[in-house]
Image (cartoon, grey):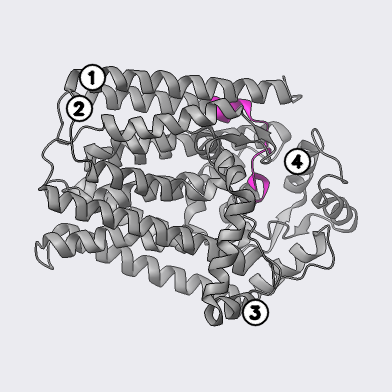
Amino acid sequence: MKHYGKSDRIILLQLCTLLVLGLTYSLIIPPFEAPDEAAHFARAYGVAEGQFILHDHPARLVQFIKEVLEEHHDAQSLPMLNLMNDLLEQQDSRIPNLAYNSSLYSPVPYLFHALVIKILMTFGDSKLILYTTFYLCRILSVLLFVSLFYIATRALPVGAWPLFWTAVTPMALSQTGVVSTDFIVYGSAFVVICAGIGKLDDSRCLQGCFMASVFFLLMTKVTYIPLLIIPALFMMFVGGGARGPKVNAFWVGLISGLAGSITWNYLLTQFGIYETSLQIANRISTDHNIVLNPSAQFAFIVHFPLEFIKVIFRTLSTNGGGLFHQFVGVLGWLDLPILFFFIYLWTGGACASVLVAERQGSPSERASIIHGLICMSAAVLTFVAICASAYIIWMPVGSLTINLQGRYFHPVVAAILVGAVLMRPFNLNPRFETRAGFGLLFASVLINLVAVHSVFHRYGVWWSG
């Protein structure tokens, strides 16, 4: 692949920082203490068994998850434990599907973890084997995420600092260091943003990664489809012919991803998977007056779009600060925040990451502004799509706010920061850029060390074997 001078040393340091910190989170966060991690692990286990549509789980797996959760929770704080206990008493070797939320995801993003699980299955299903399998899956998440970050920076070197600063938040790193789909959502989004703007004609590897990222993003969370506006409009403005390698890669990824996503959503409806998931969600809800009805919520958005915009603004006005805190660093089950001082430090670093980003071989000033506006517009549309998805699927009818989580918005912020770099009207002194870059690396490590300390303070030496 093509190298781009002095940035190589910085990129290497960024990769090492992400890798070391990501693996640290993988090892110190107790199992299933990240949002939905138990459900994602159960989903991947089902795929390893050949259940692309998840129906049930081995009783041994459910028992393992229950015992691990009981180390830090009880049935009162975690209603799912009651359901697990009841089913384990009533059932024999197989337990009906409990991963009601992750069952809605296609099996595609779970193929990587499922391969690890399939290999380890040959050694049995003892508690030690399940622990080993679980941690190998976590480590794989980190390795794949760091690899996608590297690919994105090679496609668009100017995106290295804004992507790094987004990826190095304790929330992003901890989520990519556990068993979930976030590693592929974040990584694929980074590649889509950068490869959509960068030049790929001289690298078949980058073209293939671009195509795969478009496909995986759509097959994992179609909510992020507005990000595809970035490569689509960029290719429209710069031309290059409809048969160019980059255009072909984009269309193959887009068509296959959309076809797969549509097919999967058809299966969800045809086999009643979504209805079953709603029944489970309503069953374990602590408020039995809450009833989910996605059809009614969708109709509300279609017929009253201005009212829905008011719902978004109301959500931001009541919980915007909490969402931003989550976005930077609220670990565990979103109940372990780092100090606010480091949230401010990250915010200052985000501004600095835009200033120190190297802009070699940038296009004309007018073209850069257009490209930046495209990124910004795609980010806004993606934000609205995330809000709409959460409101339709998981909010009760007539809800005045949306239950959002900060971890949803890392691709949005990445697009905003890359757009800001492209629109920047000046370049800093190269010597100052280098010094400021090392300062950002130091600040990123400091923020995450504080987060690691918070995890240790909460859980201590948790592993009991």
What kind of residue is marked 1? Phe
Q: Residues within 10 Å of mark 3 (few under 14, many from 20)?
A: some
- In depth, the one of 460 and 361 nearer the eye is 361
Determine the CA span between mark 4 and mark 2: 54 Å
- Position of residue 49 relative to residue 137, above or below, is below
Residue 189 location, x and y as percent?
Answer: 38, 50
Image quadrant occupied by the C terminus: top right
Determine the CA span between mark 3 and mark 1: 55 Å
In the picture, the disc for residue 296 is: 3
Dot 1 falls on a residue whose secondary structure is helix
In the picture, the disc for residue 42 is: none
Determine the CA span between mark 3 and mark 2: 52 Å
Residue 244 location, x and y as percent?
Answer: 12, 61
Which residue matches tag 2? Answer: 428
Q: Residues within 10 Å of mark 2 (few under 14, many from 20)?
A: few
Residue 24 figure quarter: top right
Which residue matches tag 4? Answer: 64
Q: Residues within 10 Å of mark 1 (few under 14, many from 20)?
A: few
Left or right: 320 in relation to 240: right
Q: Is residue 33 magenta?
A: yes
- In depth, the one of 155 and 340 nearer the eye is 340
Mark 3 vs mark 4: in front? 3
Mark 4 vs mark 1: in front? 1
Is there CB contact under 8 Å for labels 3 and 2?
no
Visible in this render: residue 16? Answer: yes
Which residue matches tag 1? Answer: 432
Mark 3 vs mark 1: in front? 1
Is there CB contact under 8 Å for labels 1 and 2?
yes
- Which portion, as a residue range, is magenta? 24-39
